[in-house]
Amino acid sequence: MDVKAAITRADGTTEDITLLCRIDTLDEVDYYLHGGILHYVLRRMMAEED
């Protein structure tokens, strides 16, 4: 999947680039579905407390 990124340099100039987003492992699929690794880890930690 292509994603767009904007680079803003210290001098204030900007550049738009396209990056390739790759999901290579099942763990990465889980991270993506949870909205990122932080959300994934926090949800797992909360589930372990129950």
Image (tube, rainbow, N blue to C red):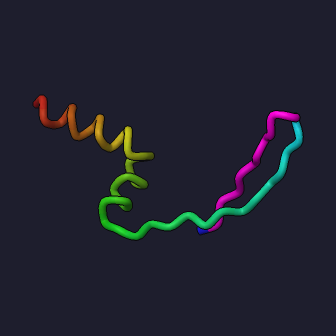
Q: Main secondary structure of the magenta part?
A: strand
Q: Is residue 47 left or right of residue 38?
A: left
Query: Looking at the picture, how far across and down is residue 34, in whole percent?
Result: 38, 48
Comparing 12 with 42, the one in front is 12
- Quadrant where the image shows the N terminus: bottom right
| Magenta-highlighted residues | 2-11
Q: Write down the quadrant of residue 20 in the picture.
A: bottom right
Say which of 8 and 40 sits in front. 8
Figure disc tally: 0
* Residue 26 part of the magenta segment: no
* Residue 18 drawn at (x, y percent): 72, 62
On screen, residue 49 versus residue 24, left or right, reads left
**Rendered image quadrant of residue 43:** top left
Residue, x 21% and y 32% (percent of image)?
A: 46
Above or below: residue 9 compared with residue 49: below
Q: Position of residue 49 (x, y in %)?
A: 12, 29
Q: Which residue shows up at 71% across the image and 52% down it?
A: 5
Occupied quadrant, residue 13: top right
Residue drawn where x is 13% and y is 35% of the image: 48
In-image side of 42 versus 8 (left or right)? left
